[in-house]
Amino acid sequence: MLKLPMIFADHMVLQREKPISVWGEAAPGEKIRITLGGTKTETAADSDGSWRAVLPELAAAVGLELVIEGEDEKAVFSDVCIGEVWIAGGQSNMEYLLGFEMHFDEVAAAERNPLIRFFDYPEVAYEGQLQDFDYKNCGFWRRCTKEDLGWFSAVGYYFAKELQADLKVPVGIVGCNWGGTTASCWMDPEYLRGTAGEVWITDYENSIAGMDMDAYLRDYRTNPMNDRTDELHSEFSVRMVKEGVTREEQLKMMEEAPAGLSVLYERRPGGLYGTMLKKIVPYSARGVIWYQGESDGDGHAQEYELVFSKMIENWRALWGERLPFLFVQLAPFREWMMCSGKNYGIVRACQDAVSRKVPDAWMVTSGDAGMEWDIHPKNKKPIGERLALSARGHVYGEDVLCDAPEAVRAYRENGDVHIEFRYADGLEIRGGALNALQGVLEDGSTAELSEAAVGHPERDGVYTLIVRNAGAVKELRYGMTDYYEINLYNRSDFPAKPFSIKVEETQQE
């Protein structure tokens, strides 16, 4: 009766230089033997049939065999690698398939790297869904083959590609994500109770009050729209996500849509935490890359700092270690279907706060990667590459510039305003005039400020942006609208973080 989680399969990548967890089910008391290369360990199932064993830390390796033996059954997994494992979580922009991404043809034509692997946990909203639909395309380890490459998370692929080239070890990405989900879907609801984040639980409970949930779930189980097994070839996904539709087409589609909005079961607080995330715990990993927050912007944006912080706390408790979290600040965006970016500025500020307050959590910017009328930017390459650079600097300890330029103070001088930055080596305005900067005047009105120049750090060691003709400005706001186009970068190609900063009357020594 030996049963194993689906994440244990041929071509898997196991985490190097950390204890390796292996677990499953067997008959109560059954002895289990695990062999990986020349390393062996034993354990026994407890009274409810659950068992877990831990292999010691191992160095990077390829071509291994993992053997898990019960008293009457044996599972043998081949082509096992030991390297770096990262969990790729979030919603649709992390889920976004490489086969949909704008550089896919170029990637597919290039030499394929056998040391990059990808496992995507099936999108499962309820226990038993794996039996209700044909999940033959999901739940196994993929390699960079012609057949598999399009199924990778685009962000996950570009992250892994950069990391593998730098570290020269196998890299495995474990996808655990679902479009349209809030952070509350991916955490134990108990972490929200008694906090302002409990509003997500209250909202969901109110939405199902008076519903016949048995009838709803029967319909959910048989509704073909809930078949999440072939997104790469789904007519809806190809049309809406890969190709995109114009704003005019979107308005027409919404006008013709049936009235009313049904409950979406996968979006219940704690739902995917139980049916997806916990199915891969405690698979040993180096850390998490995370791209999410769009759906929180459509709900309770002001609570995102708390909810996201609590989610990170919850995940770290699950794994029993302070996993590094590298995450993406929301890209510029205005409207797509019924989704709006009007609260994205709040979410971005919450994300920035998390990066400053939560230990070992770092944010990368995407201010140059958004689309005004599409919530799914087609260019995921810079996002994955920035996450990889962040990992190299913050997690692997390399001496690289791996953060976005960050405004720390502004002061008035000779009719101009000087903005001082950190993480700004190589500060550069690309394209002449500065984009996305507004000045707030004494009466509260705003003015666009585009005339600016980069200062001379070689003279004073400070990286400064000099904004011309801004003598009457009391506050500066950069990238604080829903949609904007940023063109201020450092030498690592990170666009500057959005900011709002008061202007000091004089420079303080």
Image (cartoon, rainbow, N blue to C red):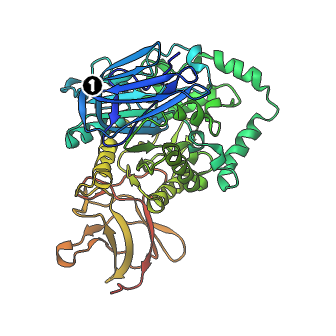
Residue 174, picture quadrant: top left
Q: Secondary structure at mark 1?
A: strand
Please rate how many residues cluster around mark 1, counting C-alpha atoms within 10 Å: few if below 14, some from 14 to 19, many from 20: some
Q: Position of residue 76 (x, y in %)?
A: 36, 17
> Which of 292 and 50 lies nearest the eye of the viewer?
50
Whether 138 is drawn above or below 357: the answer is above
Whether 261 is drawn above or below 428: the answer is above
Q: Left or right: where does residue 455 sit relative to residue 117?
A: left
> Which of 333 and 234 lies nearest the eye of the viewer?
234
> Which of 23 and 451 lies nearest the eye of the viewer?
23
Quadrant for the C terminus, please: bottom left
Whether 496 is drawn above or below 383: the answer is below
Residue 406, picture quadrant: bottom left
Q: Left or right: where does residue 491 sit relative to residue 384?
A: left
For residue 374, say whether it is visible. Answer: no
Whether 353 is drawn above or below 411: the answer is above
Q: Position of residue 145 (x, y in %)?
A: 27, 20
Q: Residue at x 64, y 31 (%)?
A: 264
- Residue topped by disc 1: 64
Q: Position of residue 48 (x, y in %)?
A: 62, 27
Q: Residue at x 54, y 72 (%)?
A: 444
In the rendered structure, which amino acid carries the disc numbered 1? Leu
Q: Left or right: where does residue 91 sit relative to residue 86?
A: right
Q: How many marks?
A: 1
Q: Left or right: where does residue 301 sit relative to residue 361?
A: right
> Which of 255 and 169 lies nearest the eye of the viewer?
169
Q: Position of residue 163 (x, y in %)?
A: 26, 41
For residue 254, say whether it is visible. Answer: yes
